[in-house]
């Protein structure tokens, strides 16, 4: 998380996201404490074993924000159709970035061309 830099429309890059959406595997007190200490809202559902043990105020869970996480998961799944990306064949980061850009461009063109009459 310390390496994340979000680029906005103008100005310098933000170092922290406002929210972090993750699946139940990341529902750990240590992760939640770190996010809270850094002012990041956790959008992580609680595991069933944690619901029984949890005491005090119930944890906030934004279901609407969590549903948007599905779009990212589907995008990553489509990028993994490119074997070169999913197995990380490229030795250098520049080559990997070029293939990533090519895969995104190909998907975008496929989307545009499939919607034309």
Image (tube, rainbow, N blue to C red):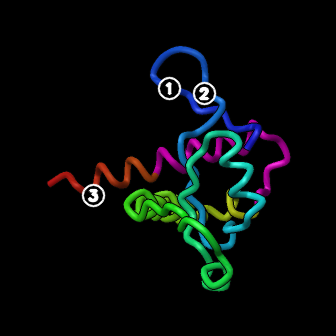
The answer to the question of whether label 2 and label 1 lie on touching residues, with beta carbons closer than 8 A, is yes
**Element at label 2:** loop
Name the N-terminal-most of marks 2 and 1: 1
**Percent position (x, y) of residue 28?**
73, 67
On residue 67, the disc is none
Please name the residue that numbered disc 1 is placed on.
8
Q: Main secondary structure of the magenta part?
A: helix
Q: According to the image, label 3 marks what residue?
A: 114
| Residue reaching furthest to the right | 91
Q: Secondary structure at mark 3?
A: helix
The residue that appears at 71% across and 43% down in the rendered structure is 37
Q: Horizontal and vertical percent for residue 52?
A: 63, 85
For the record, the magenta segment spans 88-106
User: Looking at this rendering, what residue extends furthest in the front direction?
Assistant: 56
Q: Residue furthest left?
A: 117
Q: Earlier in the sequence, mark 2 or mark 3?
A: 2
For the C terminus, which image quadrant? bottom left
**Residue that mark 2 sits on:** 14
Name which quarter of the figure residue 53 lies in.
bottom right
Q: Position of residue 66 (x, y in %)?
A: 46, 62
- Residue 17, percent from left and from top: 58, 39
């Amino acid at each position: 998380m310390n390496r994340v830099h979000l680029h906005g429309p103008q100005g310098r890059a933000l170092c922290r996201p406002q929210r972090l959406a993750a699946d139940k595997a990341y529902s750990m007190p240590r992760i939640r404490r770190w996010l809270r200490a850094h002012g990041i809202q956790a959008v992580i559902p609680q595991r069933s074993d944690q619901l029984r043990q949890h005491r005090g105020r119930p944890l906030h869970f934004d279901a609407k924000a969590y549903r948007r996480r599905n779009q990212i998961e589907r995008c990553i799944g489509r990028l993994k159709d490119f074997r070169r990306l999913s197995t990380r064949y490229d030795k250098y980061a520049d080559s990997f970035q070029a293939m990533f850009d090519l895969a995104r461009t190909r998907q975008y063109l496929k989307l545009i061309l499939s919607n034309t009459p």
